[in-house]
Image: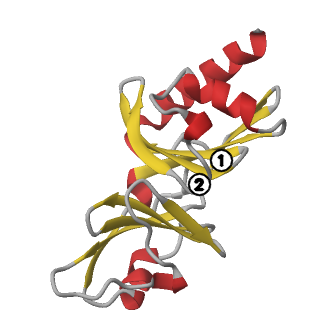
Amino acid sequence: MSDLRPITALGAALPRLESFGALEIRENAGLALASLAVRRETVEPRPFGLTLPGPGRWIGGQGVAALWTGPDQWMIEYEGCAELDFAAELKLRAPGCSVTEQTDGWVAFEIVSRAGSRPLEALLSKLVNVDLAGFGTGLATRTGLEHMSCFVIRRGDAHVAVLGARSSAGSLWHALETAAKRLGER
């Protein structure tokens, strides 16, 4: 039998973490994801006690969060549970809904500014077509970042998450890293 070891989306044993001046970019390898879709004639669930958000919104609480992805559809996040069968647990909490495991299809990068929102907004203004000054906590959108589609989630005033396809993890990291380095050179 081969000696199999899990690796992160960036291909390492441990998640990548780098600082660029006031900014820190961290690969969030522990984030479990599952999609949730409400079927016709099913009551909208409240998984883990969350009230599912409306269009353009994200809501979090006690390690669990939900991101609106389309009419009657959400991506549910569970921090620190990527190695568990999160979809099965979510299915138990959302009877009558369609639930699909998404953890291994996505990569999450958490970007935090130690100097307030300005460095974060300066970084992302170079990368995404989102007016981050008017993009407050709890807002989320799908947008393009270079040639990739991703979700941008405003988790806090100085904290943004970028979720992208796992197959593009290296390119997504490179884009974030390059822009962060250039921002620090000014």
Q: Residue at x 57, y 57 (%)?
A: 138
Question: Which mark is on residue 15?
Answer: 1
Query: How many C-alpha atoms fall within 10 Å of the one at disc 2: few (<14), some, or many (≥20)?
Result: many
Q: Residue at x 42, y 23 (%)?
A: 146
The answer, for residue 165, to whether it is visible in the render is no
Residue 24 vs 45, above or below: the answer is above
What kind of residue is marked 2? Ala
Sequence order check, earlier mark of 1 and 2: 1
Q: Residue at x 47, y 28 (%)?
A: 171
Q: Residue 89: which quarter of the image?
A: bottom left
Left or right: where 21 falls relative to 48: right
Q: Quadrant of the C terminus?
A: top right
Q: Estimate the x, y position of residue 147 in percent, counting from the top left.
A: 36, 25
What kind of residue is marked 1? Pro
Q: Estimate the x, y position of residue 175 in percent, counting from the top left.
A: 53, 24
Residue denoted by label 2: 29
Q: CA distance from mark 1 to mark 2?
A: 6 Å
Mark 1 touches mark 2? (CB < 8 Å): yes
Left or right: where 18 falls relative to 13: right
Q: Which element is circle 1 on?
A: loop
Query: How many C-alpha atoms fall within 10 Å of the one at disc 1: few (<14), some, or many (≥20)?
Result: some
Q: Estimate the x, y position of residue 108 in percent, counting from the top left.
A: 54, 48
Residue 58 vs 89, above or below: the answer is above
Q: Nearest the camera: 136 or 19? A: 136
